Image: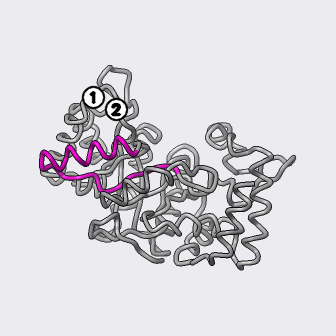
């Protein structure tokens, strides 16, 4: 496993990190989820991602339950707040009330005194940016959060937050968590350039397009038993990638991967890690064995010829 700085901070995170959306507390058996976290440690992963909204806090409980057996300084943990956690009018968003209360609730579920990264899970148009940034800054000053991050914020929103933080001498955002894979490349145009300018690193989710870029799905065939596409709870998240056009591209990418001597999943992850601004790619695992293959993408350097072949497939 190789490690990268989180943006321009001094924090080092594994190039491959383990997430808990769709793979913990409800979608995957608890025993497999716990075993996957333990396996991740064995494979050199030191970066774990969760959120309060994942199964309404149950994912945090599972993650925290496993991490309690490891030294706190041996791993980096991120959680988030924004999405509804109740039916009340203040049970959502990025108001000071919701941010502070949800951070405290997450810490309680995780069984920790602090989290390394606290993300604003989306941008809240109903709350003044100043209110949110000051709340996050207070959490940092009280030692409950070490680094501030955002998820799925536009380049304009990120720039506004950085400029305000600099003006008011608040802790800056240092990490952005967008979706990024071979089929979702919108961050390349504006988010990455703005982030590079301000020293913000990307920690990307869905690097394998919800498993489509593993090559397990075939045109005209039923989804493999036990896969996300075969599960009615998680199928919605993956369905937009299960088109004939995309599956045909995956078949072509398999050929490129074979020529390189790696799997198509490793190819997809190495392609993401070609971006220097990407600090880590979050993968999921329904079983420990899945991590064995994906972590091998760390350190793979794709040749210019391979990158050109990939680009030709994706653009045609």
The answer to which of 40 and 140 lies nearer the viewer is 140
Separation of residues labelled 2 and 1 (CA atoms): 6 Å
Please state if 170 lies on the left or on the right of 187 as rendered. Answer: left
Q: Residue at x 35, y 70 (%)?
A: 5
Question: 139 or 156, which is in the foreground?
Answer: 156
Q: Pointer 2 and pointer 1: residues touching (CB < 8 Å)?
A: yes
Residue marked by disc 2: 124
Label 1 sits on residue: 127
Q: In the figure, 303 relative to 211: above or below?
A: below
Q: How far across and how far down the image is residue 108, in percent?
A: 27, 46
Q: Is residue 128 magenta?
A: no
Q: Is residue 236 left or right of residue 17?
A: right
Q: Which residues lie in the magenta part?
A: 155-179
The image position of residue 218, as x and y in percent, is: 81, 53
At mark 2, the secondary structure is loop
| Residue 168 among those drawn in magenta | yes
């Amino acid at each position: 496993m190789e490690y990268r700085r989180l943006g321009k901070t001094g924090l080092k995170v594994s190039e491959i990190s383990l997430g808990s959306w769709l793979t913990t507390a409800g979608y995957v058996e608890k025993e497999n989820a716990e075993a996957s976290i333990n396996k991740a440690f064995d494979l050199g992963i030191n970066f774990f991602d969760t959120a309060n909204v994942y199964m309404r806090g149950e994912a945090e409980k599972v993650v925290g339950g496993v991490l309690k057996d490891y030294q706190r300084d041996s791993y980096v943990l991120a959680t988030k707040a924004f999405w509804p956690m109740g039916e009340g009018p203040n049970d959502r968003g990025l108001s000071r009330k919701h941010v502070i209360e949800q951070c405290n609730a997450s810490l309680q579920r995780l069984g920790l005194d602090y989290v390394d990264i606290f993300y604003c899970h989306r941008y809240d148009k109903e709350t003044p940016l100043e209110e949110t940034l000051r709340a996050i800054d207070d959490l940092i000053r009280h030692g409950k959060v070490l680094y501030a991050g955002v998820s799925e914020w536009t380049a304009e929103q990120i720039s506004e937050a950085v400029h305000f933080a600099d003006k008011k001498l608040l802790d800056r955002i240092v990490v952005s968590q967008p979706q990024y894979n071979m089929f979702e490349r919108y961050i390349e145009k504006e988010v990455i350039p703005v982030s590079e300018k301000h020293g913000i690193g990307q920690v990307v989710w869905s690097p394998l397009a919800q498993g489509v870029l593993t090559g397990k799905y075939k045109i005209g065939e039923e989804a493999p038993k036990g896969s996300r596409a075969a599960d009615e709870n998680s199928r919605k998240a993956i369905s937009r990638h299960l088109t004939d056009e995309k599956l045909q591209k995956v078949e072509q990418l398999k050929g490129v991967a074979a020529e390189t001597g790696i799997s198509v999943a490793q190819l997809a992850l190495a392609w993401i890690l070609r971006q220097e601004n990407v600090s880590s790619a979050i993968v999921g695992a329904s079983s420990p064995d899945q991590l064995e293959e994906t972590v091998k993408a760390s350190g793979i350097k794709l040749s210019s010829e391979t990158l050109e072949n990939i680009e030709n497939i994706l653009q045609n």
